[in-house]
Amino acid sequence: MTLVAVTGGSGKLGRAVVRDLLDNGYDVVNLDVAPPREQLCPYTRIDFTDYGQAVEAFSAIDSRYAKVDAVVHLAAIPGPGMTGNAATFANNVTVSYNVFAAARAAGIRNVVWASSETVLGLPFDTPPPYLPVDEEYAGRPETAYSLAKHLDEQMAAQFCRWDPELKMIGLRFSNVMEPGDYANFASWQDDPKARMWNLWSYIDCRDGAQAVRRALEYTRPGLEVFIIANADTVMRRETVDLAAEVFPDLPWQRPVAGNETLLSIDKARRVLGFEPVHGWR
């Protein structure tokens, strides 16, 4: 059994990740400042703004575990505007550094963490360079939150340079949805601009958890970054019609059909074997 430490395991995506890993035969420990709604696995309160707590968490916790094999890092202020810009940036960059450095100190070489779709340039007040968007163009952070996520990716690249045996995978999650959130989708259907800020995309938390597991099981060392979204949009209108109304001048990288997402998951499909199986429809 592999013991996976999930930081932020009490959160929206974290809950789904913990459950998915347990269902697939992993041992899991949830490390979070907030206790879980339902305790599916051992929980220890850890504040990752404190490097000493991070080091201890990845080494051993009495009566919990003696060794961590892999880290899934989800702990963060989860979006812009939830607190002040400087506080969001300071918290999220510090927490990521502490997690990355503490994992390295503990000899852990399998790290998967939550990057963000916002690195692509959300809320797309400045249009992206082309459609569908992918991982090939440089990050375009537009908020303090996004800037922190962008710097996490740059930081991970240097950790991998320092240790050629280290594997770090950043997952640029789209807007995470639980099944209970799908009731809200009807309110967006009459206004294509209501959700244009992320190209009408989303990720079901259960498929987000699948992506995490596939990233943990990917074996090649080094840094990789993947967009993780559902295969469809949040809209009933076809994607080409939505884009023609809101982004009429953008070039197309390739054709899209029906309600296909404009946050390309081609790389995640090809490299990780990721394939969404849950959705709002």
Image: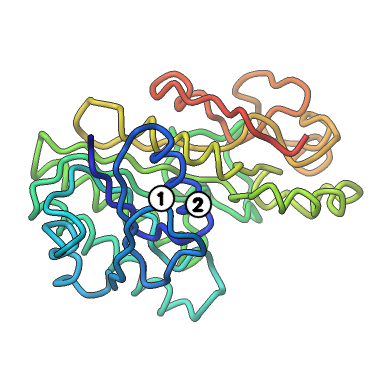
Report helix, strand or loop for mark 1.
Answer: strand
| N-terminal-most mark, 1 or 2 | 2
Is disc 1 in contact with disc 2, using a CB cutoff of under 8 Å?
Answer: yes
Q: Is residue 74 left or right of residue 165?
A: right
Query: Which residue matches tag 1?
Result: 114
Residue 97 rendering spot, x and y as whole percentages: 23, 62
Of 271 and 50, the residue lying toward us: 50
Q: CA distance from mark 1 to mark 2?
A: 10 Å
For the N terminus, the quadrant is top left
Of 80 and 9, the residue lying toward us: 9
Total label count?
A: 2
Residue 243 rendering spot, x and y as whole percentages: 76, 36
Which residue appears at 52% of the width and 61% of the height? 142
In the displayed structure, 262 sits above or below 204; it is above
Q: Is residue 215 left or right of residue 1?
A: right
Which residue appears at 53% of the width and 57% of the height? 12
Q: What's the residue type where badge 1 is placed?
A: Ala
Of 178 and 121, the residue lying toward us: 178
Q: Residues within 10 Å of mark 1 (few under 14, many from 20)?
A: many
Q: What's the residue type where badge 2 is placed?
A: Leu
Of 69 and 246, the residue lying toward us: 69
For the C terminus, the quadrant is top right
Query: Which residue matches tag 2?
Result: 13
Q: Which mark is residue 245?
A: none
The residue most toward the right is 190
